Image (tube, rainbow, N blue to C red):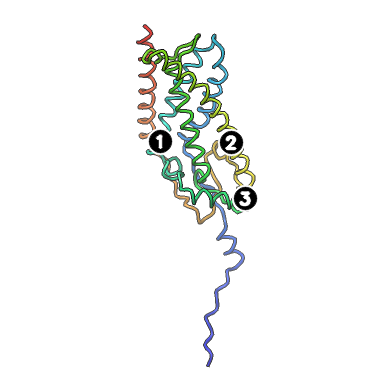
């Protein structure tokens, strides 16, 4: 007698659609969204006022505030919700290559946070912004001196001004790549990244890890206070040295 294998159960149409169904999930918490758009505003102000002597005070204020914002984001990268933490989106080379392949084949699915390629783009952007902000504090040119420039010898303050200028070109290039990445992911990855950074939601498959909890408000307040204290302390030190 021939023994036949047990029949494979077939999924109904409803079950198949449910397996691939998507749900709306709150991914980006309020601190991350406020950080993103405030950072954009501050960078535009700093960029617009950087080469105009009459606006150097505004340029300095925007730069110091931007530095405080970056310090907050670094803290929130360890204390925020799952999507905000560096550990959730800084992946290894294999994950990056796999994501790029899926994107090119049109099979990339929205993820609960930054994708592996975008995650490293975020890290590079934060690093360049930090270099730009810190170098500006110590820079000295013929018509401007950063608030902390007196702490350095003149030759080093001049070098910091060169770093400030060269890094800006790198930062502008990185911003261009960021915008290109947003466009490509929005088209081929079938997700509106701009909209999700406004309202905080993403449409994720049921198989995705959708259990993203918001970061503690208390931790956000503490992180903001610490960041403001550091940035404000640097500005106060600069005013003290200039007195």
Q: Residue at x 46, y 13 (%)?
A: 140
Q: Where 50 sits versus 20, above or below?
A: above
Residue position for label 1: 76
Residue position for label 2: 177
Q: Residue furthest front?
A: 155
Left or right placement of residue 215 versus residue 202 in this view = left
Nearer the observer, 168 or 19: 168
Residue 224, horizontal then vertical, whole percent: 39, 28
Left or right placement of residue 186 versus residue 146 in this view = right
Q: Where 196 sits versus 45, above or below?
A: below
Lower position in the chain sequence, tag 3 or tag 2: 3
Q: Residue at x 47, y 17 (%)?
A: 61
Residue position for label 3: 104
Q: Quadrant of residue 241?
A: top left
**Crowding at mark 2 (Cα within 10 Å: few <14, some 14-19, many 20+):** few
Assess whether mark 2 and mark 3 are in contact (beta carbons under 8 angstroms).
Answer: no
């Amino acid at each position: 007698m021939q023994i036949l294998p047990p029949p494979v159960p077939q999924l109904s149409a409803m079950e198949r659609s449910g397996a691939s169904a998507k749900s709306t999930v709150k991914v980006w918490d309020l601190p991350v969204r406020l950080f993103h758009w405030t950072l954009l505003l501050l960078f535009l102000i700093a960029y617009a006022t950087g080469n105009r002597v009459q606006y150097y005070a505004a340029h300095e204020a925007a730069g110091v505030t931007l530095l405080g914002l970056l310090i907050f984001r670094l803290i929130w990268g360890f204390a925020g919700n799952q999507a905000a933490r560096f550990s959730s989106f800084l992946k290894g080379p294999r994950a990056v290559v796999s994501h790029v392949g899926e994107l090119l084949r049109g099979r990339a699915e929205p993820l609960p946070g930054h994708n592996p390629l975008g995650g490293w783009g975020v890290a590079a952007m934060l690093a360049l912004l930090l270099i730009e902000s810190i170098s500006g504090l110590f820079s000295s040119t013929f018509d401007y001196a950063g608030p902390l420039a007196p702490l350095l010898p003149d030759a080093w303050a001049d070098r910091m001004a060169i770093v400030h200028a060269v890094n800006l070109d790198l930062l502008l290039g990185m911003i261009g790549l960021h915008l290109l990445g947003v466009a490509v992911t929005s088209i081929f990855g079938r997700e509106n990244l701009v909209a999700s950074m406004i309202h905080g939601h993403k449409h994720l498959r049921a198989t995705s890890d959708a259990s993203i909890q918001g970061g503690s408000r208390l931790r956000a307040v503490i992180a903001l206070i610490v960041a403001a204290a550091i940035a404000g302390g640097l500005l106060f030190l600069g005013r003290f040295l200039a007195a």
